[in-house]
Image: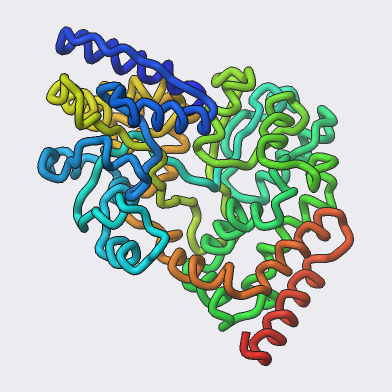
Amino acid sequence: MESGIHAGYRAAAKLYEEKTGIKVKVETFTPDDTYRQKFQAAANSKNLPDVMNWWAAAGDSIENSVVELSGEIGDDILSTYYSAAMDPIIVTQSQVDSWQADKNATNIQKSLKAGQFYGLPLDIGGFFTFYGNKKIIEEAGLSAEAPQTWEEFVSMMETIKEKTGTPGLVFGAKLPDLWENWAGSALSIMLNEPQGYIDLLERNSKLSDPANLPVVKAMETLADKDLLMPGILSTDIDGADQAFAAGKAAFDLGGSFTMSTLLAMGMNPEDIIAFPVPPLEGSKITSWTTDPFTLTMMSVNKDSKNKEDALDFIKFLTADPDAAIAFANAAYTVPALNLGDRSAELEPSLKAISDAFSTEPGPYSQASPAINTFRGKHKEWEVYAQSMQSMMEKKMSAEEVAKKFDDTMESLKASGN
């Protein structure tokens, strides 16, 4: 399914064979559509492998083919994962109610009961991650270390551009709301704490307020100082990663999952630093942590002739620290297992990403209900995303962007929208 994941399975399978004497044969299929087709064909012919890796979800049509695990897995295993790792996997009562009321729900979905789960969480991810090219940073005479503030980050980019001619930053700016989703919201939440961002989402404050304007100015600074890669507005996520991997920008904005993409593009992990969005000076929260979400899960074929061994293997892979670390370092993904002090054994870039993940609900989770409710519903955020693109082209100032947001918000409120 994912680039590099085959190496992760091989590393964990080798450990499992050493521990149990049982050899695990690994097969991977890419891209995702091919994998889904292979799975469906094998399920139809009752020819699935003993163990499968699938996207972390409930009601995703695989339940007829895999073991329901709530009677097999106890809290001794479940309590070892990140606190939210099982959230997308366990069937909730609200899902059950929704599927029962939905005429388009599948028969599988309608058959599910609250509390059931059909997989164990393998790896987790999150956004809000910058990647830096160590070679370019050091060529500029700088130390390849994470900046502690946004202002320090900007200063690094200025020095890099002056000394090497390399643009500072690339990201998928072709997607208008990517900046807010992956960086801007973090800057806001750190600057004014979650409630400050909630107030903006709930229309209880203005973007032009002195407390909020610095977040808009953060992007204005990058544009005014020509620190964005030329052509950034026609660059999508893959294009940004490719540009960064080719040395066309010193820094790339992505998520934890970007690491495996960069390695698949030929980068050496030793040439990459990773760090979370740094706070603006004066922020009330001085380092960013985010609540990770589960990427994939491990499931057992219900018709497997080796069901007990298969179940033992997925418990080993997801809940044994030795296996989780071996898998993570080879696949370049963060394990769903809460490693605690043993996270020091992760590769440096993975550890930096892991350190920014909250083991308990963090600041983003406090704001996320308002984000989920209002950022799509309140159309001033669409206007803001487009205005930010104009600002990247130096066609609008931060003050003009904020005023347009506020004017749109007031006019929508007046019309009852």
Given the current orientation, which residue lies at the most extreme front position? Answer: 45
Q: Is residue 293 left or right of residue 281?
A: left
Name the quadrant containing residue 337.
top left
Image colouring = rainbow
Name the quadrant containing residue 12.
top left
Q: Is residue 136 left or right of residue 230?
A: left
Q: Position of residue 88 (x, y in %)?
A: 34, 50
Q: Is residue 398 left or right of residue 45?
A: right
Q: Position of residue 383 (x, y in %)?
A: 73, 69
Residue occupying the point 80% across, 44% down:
234
Residue occupying the point 68% across, 65% down:
214
Q: Is residue 110 above or below residue 204?
A: above
Residue occupying the point 85% across, 65% down:
396
Q: Quadrant of the C terminus?
A: bottom right
Q: How many marks?
A: 0
Given the current orientation, which residue lies at the most extreme right position? Answer: 395
Q: Is residue 199 above or below residue 394?
A: below
User: Who is closer to the viewer here, 107 or 308?
Assistant: 107
**Observer able to see residue 340:** no
Q: Position of residue 119 (x, y in %)?
A: 27, 39
**Observer able to see residue 279:** yes
Q: Position of residue 104 (x, y in %)?
A: 42, 60
Residue occupying the point 67% across, 92% down:
414
